[in-house]
Image (cartoon, coloured by chain):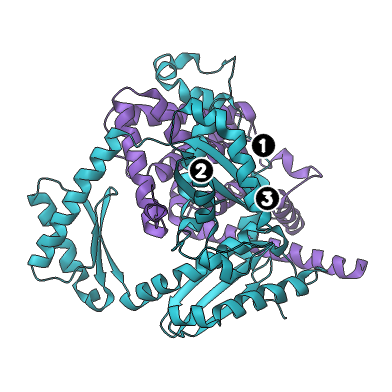
């Protein structure tokens, strides 16, 4: 093949188009009984799906089970001939939904209002933002019941890039509640960044 | 907006610490069985890790677009490539062309040389003609040849992958063929109905119809007509009408070769600490944004930024490029880790 023939401009829309086509072909192959095609279709999505589920559930076993069940659900939907245009989005939403379902079940079973994990020392942005908020609320004497939704909102919005409307539907919250959680998270992060910068300057 | 990006980035980094168990990939492989024996979900043992390859292949497809663009220019001028080439040299002969020629010289038959960004690294996906067995047997030799070439250019931020020629599945070929025919038909039907249509892309599930931005007002009408035509054609599909600015498209294709040379150089060399390169093509001004991984306070930041600026400016201001870009005005922005423009 001459190098010129390699001139594939797979940018922007085309890149997406090619991916969609590939996925469609894979779905047809799955329906034709090629199981290998299913692995090709979902493998690139497993990591992000699992990460989302694990962050919501904080349990390896449960996250694994959710992703497994989502795969079965996806497989059955494909086999039944359901038309799925944007498979990635569809699959991630499925995983998010199933994770939230399981998470709700957990909450029902052990009705602890505040996640115990919040109090650990080692924390990344999710934990620290949450911790700041929780401390503030305790100080202000506000009920922290809402905090259970808080981290899920952050994960769904910033990691899964879901729309505010979708998140509020999924979690059964008002749009305004989702927005105000996001605003609080931004403020908490801003505060933390400013503090870090301040310490940084002093230590030099 | 910036705080949103920081949040996103931090959450993403945090997420990256979580690793999906390999059993999930095994599960996907055996999906039929798993689906049939659903009660037996929990205990899965004896995992192999053979999933990596296909995962890689699909992800590659997604990322390929970034660099591949113009990596293939006219290889007419032969020249000696010295250590760390100038942008002008890259422009004359991009690395995929160099690789292709070198392999051919050694008697190999390259079927494709892809270049894309894989995380923070450039990834070369080189496909050779021949059986899998042959390719496996030659892999080390090929890797040596390529490593030498890349080192000669001073590149140090890449990975190489050698594989045998990928076959496009007959199913996909058939879909593409039918879709392309459908697209052509729709385009001529619409043109016949008196619309100015730039392009119709019917390859993906949603049919994309491109029209000049001047016809924006006709969007809705055109949408309905296209839907009806597809229905009448016995192939009802979703349709999206997209307006394109002809002037921007033209600019983009004029600038593409130069931009590709810039990408090659700055992505393939670690020293520059370039995270991403973005462009916008407006008739008033073309913008090039170099996003780096540095902070203003980093010791080497100033020197690196000045180097980046100097190289790009000299290149874009050279007579050769100016003829190609027709002296179009441009701006060059170099940003730090947080998206702020460097003060130097």
Q: Which residue is mark 2?
A: B126
Could you tell me which secondary element the residue under label 1 belongs to? Answer: loop
In front of the other: label 3 or label 2? Answer: 2
Find residue B275 and report its horizontal and vertical position in percent: 63, 61
- Chain letter of mark 3 equals A
Q: Which residue is mark 1?
A: A112
**Does the image show residue B214?**
yes
Taking depth in this image into account, of A67 and B148 the one nearest to the observer is: B148
**Chain painted in cyan in the figure:** B
Q: Are marks 3 and 1 on the same chain?
A: yes
Q: Which residue is mark 3?
A: A126
**Chain colored purple:** A
Image quadrant containing the N terminus of chain B = bottom right
Answer few, some or many: residues within 10 Å of disc 2's Cα (few below 14, many 20 plus, some between 14 and 19): many
| Same chain assignment for discs 3 and 2 | no
In the current view of this chain or complex, which residue is farthest to the right? A203
- Judge depth for marks 3 and 1 and give the one in front: 3
Real-space Cα separation, disc 2 to disc 1, in angstroms: 55 Å
């Amino acid at each position: 093949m001459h190098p010129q023939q390699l001139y594939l401009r797979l940018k922007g829309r085309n890149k997406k188009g090619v991916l969609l086509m590939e996925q469609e072909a894979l779905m047809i192959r799955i329906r034709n009984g090629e199981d290998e095609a299913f692995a090709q279709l979902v493998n690139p999505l497993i990591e992000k799906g699992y990460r989302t589920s694990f962050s919501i559930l904080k349990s390896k076993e449960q996250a694994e089970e959710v992703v497994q069940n989502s795969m079965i659900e996806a497989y059955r939907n494909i086999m039944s001939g359901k038309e799925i245009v944007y498979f990635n989005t569809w699959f991630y939403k499925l995983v998010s939904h199933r994770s939230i379902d399981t998470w709700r079940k957990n909450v029902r079973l052990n009705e602890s209002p505040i996640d115990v994990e919040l109090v650990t020392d080692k924390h990344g942005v999710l934990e620290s933002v949450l911790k700041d908020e929780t401390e503030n609320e305790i100080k202000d004497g506000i009920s922290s019941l809402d905090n259970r939704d808080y981290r899920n909102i952050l994960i769904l919005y910033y990691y899964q890039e879901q729309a505010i409307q979708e998140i509020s539907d999924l979690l059964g919250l008002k749009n305004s509640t989702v927005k105000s959680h996001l605003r609080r998270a931004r403020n908490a992060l801003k505060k933390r960044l400013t503090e870090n910068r301040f310490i940084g300057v002093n230590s030099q | 907006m910036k705080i949103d990006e920081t949040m996103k980035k931090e959450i993403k980094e945090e997420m990256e610490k979580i690793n999906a168990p390999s059993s999930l990939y095994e599960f996907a492989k055996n999906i039929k069985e798993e689906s049939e024996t659903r009660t037996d979900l929990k205990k899965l043992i004896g995992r192999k890790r053979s999933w990596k390859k296909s995962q890689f292949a699909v992800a590659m497809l997604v990322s390929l677009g970034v660099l591949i663009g113009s990596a293939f220019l006219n290889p007419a001028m032969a020249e000696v490539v010295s250590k760390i080439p100038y942008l002008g040299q890259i422009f004359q002969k991009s690395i995929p062309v160099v690789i292709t020629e070198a392999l051919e010289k050694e008697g190999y038959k390259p079927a494709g040389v892809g270049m894309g960004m894989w995380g923070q690294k450039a990834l070369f996906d080189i496909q050779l003609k021949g059986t899998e067995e042959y390719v496996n047997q030659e892999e080390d030799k090929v890797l040596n040849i390529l490593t030498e070439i890349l080192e000669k250019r001073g590149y140090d931020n890449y990975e190489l992958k050698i594989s045998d020629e990928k076959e496009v599945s007959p199913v996909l070929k058939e879909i593409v063929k039918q879709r392309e025919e459908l697209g052509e038909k729709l385009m001529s039907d619409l043109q016949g109905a008196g619309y100015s249509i730039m392009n119709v892309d019917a390859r993906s599930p949603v049919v994309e119809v491109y029209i000049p931005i001047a016809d924006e007002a006709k969007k809705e009408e055109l949408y309905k007509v296209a839907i009806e035509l597809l229905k009448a054609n016995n192939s009802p599909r979703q349709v999206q009408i997209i307006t394109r600015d002809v002037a921007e498209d033209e600019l983009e294709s004029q600038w593409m070769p130069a931009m590709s040379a810039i990408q090659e150089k700055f992505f393939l060399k670690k020293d520059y600490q370039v995270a991403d390169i973005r462009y916008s093509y407006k008739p008033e001004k073309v913008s090039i944004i170099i996003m780096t991984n540095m902070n203003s306070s980093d010791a080497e930041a100033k020197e690196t930024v000045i180097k980046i600026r100097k190289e790009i400016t000299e290149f874009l201001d050279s007579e050769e490029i100016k003829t190609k870009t027709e002296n179009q005005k441009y701006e060059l922005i170099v940003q730090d880790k947080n998206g702020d423009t460097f003060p130097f």
